[in-house]
Image (spheres, rainbow, N blue to C red):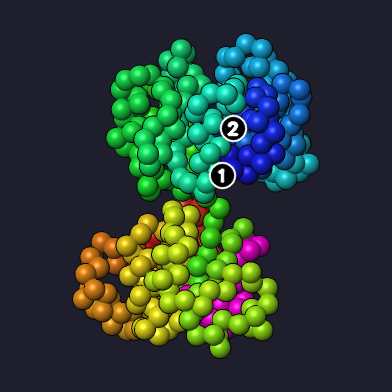
Amino acid sequence: MREIIQGIRSWGEEDVPFVLATVIQTWGSAPRPVGSHMAVSVTGDIVGSVSGGCVENAVAEAAENVLQSGIPEMLRFGVSDETAWSVGLACGGSIEVFVQRILPEENIFRKIRETIHARGTGIWCTHIRGQDSLLGRSLFITREGAVGKIDYGPIDAALISTLDAERPPRLPRVFTIGRNEVFIEPILPPARLLIVGGVHIAIPLSKMAPELDFEVYLIDPRKRFATKKRFPHLRHLIHKWPDEAMETLGIDPNTFIVVLAHDEKLDDPALIAALRQQPAYIGVLGSKRTHEKRLQRLRKADIGEHDLQRLHAPVGISIGAKSPAEIAVSILAEMIAVRRGSDEAKID
């Protein structure tokens, strides 16, 4: 949703009804991931995409029907081998798309917009299969509570008791309750990368990360390290102690933290502050021997074993990296694995 919210902003301000098409499931080499959106307004304007271009026209035609009837539709498209190459599907594939009408004046969509603009977190739950009378009904769970209803009963209760907006899932998925299926879409703020320590590895890491849609902040109280000369490409150079900087910036569920200073006077305050929050990722530089000593210090700071297990250390996926740039690649690869829910992200 975040990727199209700016494009449909005027629709919300002018209360323009529109249809939202969402990729619910994919099989094979689908061109767009689960959770991708395409919006079609009552005036025919289109924002976003659910495929490489092969099914957009069919979705737009279905959107016209849904706009008129108000009844959601589940569409399934298979991409044949003959057309696969033209849309980037080397092996073909298929996608399932849920199409629903959205009325901007409804409280739930207004709350979703507000949450996105405020860098907040939430979980949007939409009934997609099961009892026909419930199709398209939504529940939006935030830290403050829930907006909307699906069934005014057991489905809502199951979702609210199971899902935690403080720790939303990283990826959209289908949630099954009895014979009903609910699509769960996390609403997360834009990804941020907080790098602690203006060391050599931080230079290529901070250059590469924006290409992966991370907003980068470099934190180092040592002004000789965090300088514009060393980091001319960065907007955010913060000359504060890491714990103070993190308190000022705030840590949300889409914050990634990489601690590189290799100095316990900087590393430990950064890790303690990070572990007392719920960022998406905490990686820390150092050998296994260095890390064991670090764990002992953190235990003395009353950090529990469960929280210590959240640390990715040594930081990065093992690819035999040696140079600063190679190490930066290994760190970014691990962060991508976390973002995409890959097994590579799991901590031993």
Q: Which residues are magenta?
A: 196-212
Q: Secondary structure at mark 2?
A: strand
Residue 113 position, x and y percent, is 56, 37
Question: Mark 2 is on which residue type?
Answer: Thr
Which image quadrant is residue 59 in? top right
Residue 230 position, x and y percent, is 64, 83
Which residue lies at the image location 21% right of the left edge and 69% below the top edge? Answer: 302
Give the mark nearest the N terminus, 1 or 2.
Answer: 2
Residue 298: say if magenta: no
| Label drawn at residue 298 | none
Callout 2 environment at 10 Å: few (<14), some (14 to 19), or many (20+)? many
Which residue lies at the image location 47% right of the left edge and 76% below the top edge? Answer: 240
User: 343 left or right of 96?
Assistant: left
Residue 199: say if magenta: yes
Callout 1 environment at 10 Å: few (<14), some (14 to 19), or many (20+)? few
Q: Quadrant of the N terminus?
A: top right
**Which residue position is annotated with label 1?**
117
Residue 161 position, x and y percent, is 29, 35
346 and 190: which one is in front? 190
**Which residue position is annotated with label 2?**
22
Which residue lies at the image location 24% right of the left edge and 78% below the top edge? Answer: 296
Q: Is residue 145 above or below residue 318?
A: above
Residue furthest out toward the bottom: 224
